[in-house]
Image (spheres, rainbow, N blue to C red):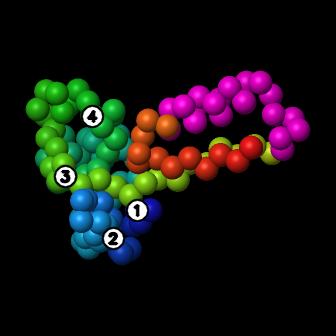
Amino acid sequence: MTPRSRSADHDLALVGTGGTIAVPLSPTFVANNSFVLIAALLAGRGIGGVQTALVRNELESGALVRVLDEFGYPPLDVHVVVPTRRYVTRTVKALITCVETAMAGHASLRASLRR
């Protein structure tokens, strides 16, 4: 998880073909909002990690470029939590199925769905 203050320790975990490495960072700017980070990137304030879907147009236009493309982030745990199985509506069941299906195609996401 990314610390939310500049004074906190910032180690960036990157996963490559040789395994995971920790890169110590000393940021001058920290954002916990993707859109704030994207604005900073477009203003030329440095490099950052954001979801490709959020910057697809900027990547296609050349406004932003990929760096460290040979690395990725460690898998992200995603949990679907419901108060009880007894009262799960069809709508919630459909949402859970949708999440499972969407996550199945992404190696960077690990499903934690218990039925």
Q: Which mark is residue 70?
A: 3
Secondary structure at badge 3 equals loop
**Which residue matches tag 1?**
2
Q: Which mark sits nearer the N-terminus, 1 or 4?
A: 1
Query: For the residue marked with disc 3, what is the amino acid?
Result: Glu
Q: Which mark sits nearer the N-terminus, 4 or 3?
A: 4
Q: The C terminus is located in which quarter? A: top right
Q: Position of residue 69 (x, y in %)?
A: 18, 49
Evaluate if marks 2 and 4 touch, with contact meaning CB atoms under 8 Å apart: no
Query: For the residue marked with disc 2, what is the amino acid?
Result: His
- Nearer to us of marks 1 and 3 is 3
29 vs 97: above or below:
below
Residue 105 image-quadrant placement: top left
Query: For the residue marked with disc 1, what is the amino acid?
Result: Thr
Secondary structure at badge 2 equals strand
Main structural element of the magenta stretch: helix, strand or loop?
Answer: helix
Q: Is residue 111 left or right of residue 65?
A: right
Instruction: Tell me where the magenta segment starts and ends, as one range.
Output: 84-103
Q: The N terminus is located in which quarter? A: bottom left
Q: Which mark is residue 10?
A: 2
Evaluate if marks 4 and 3 touch, with contact meaning CB atoms under 8 Å apart: no
Secondary structure at badge 1 equals loop
**Which residue matches tag 4?**
55
Is there any visible trace of residue 39 in the rendered image?
yes
Q: Position of residue 2 (x, y in %)?
A: 40, 62
Front residue of 40/83: it is 83
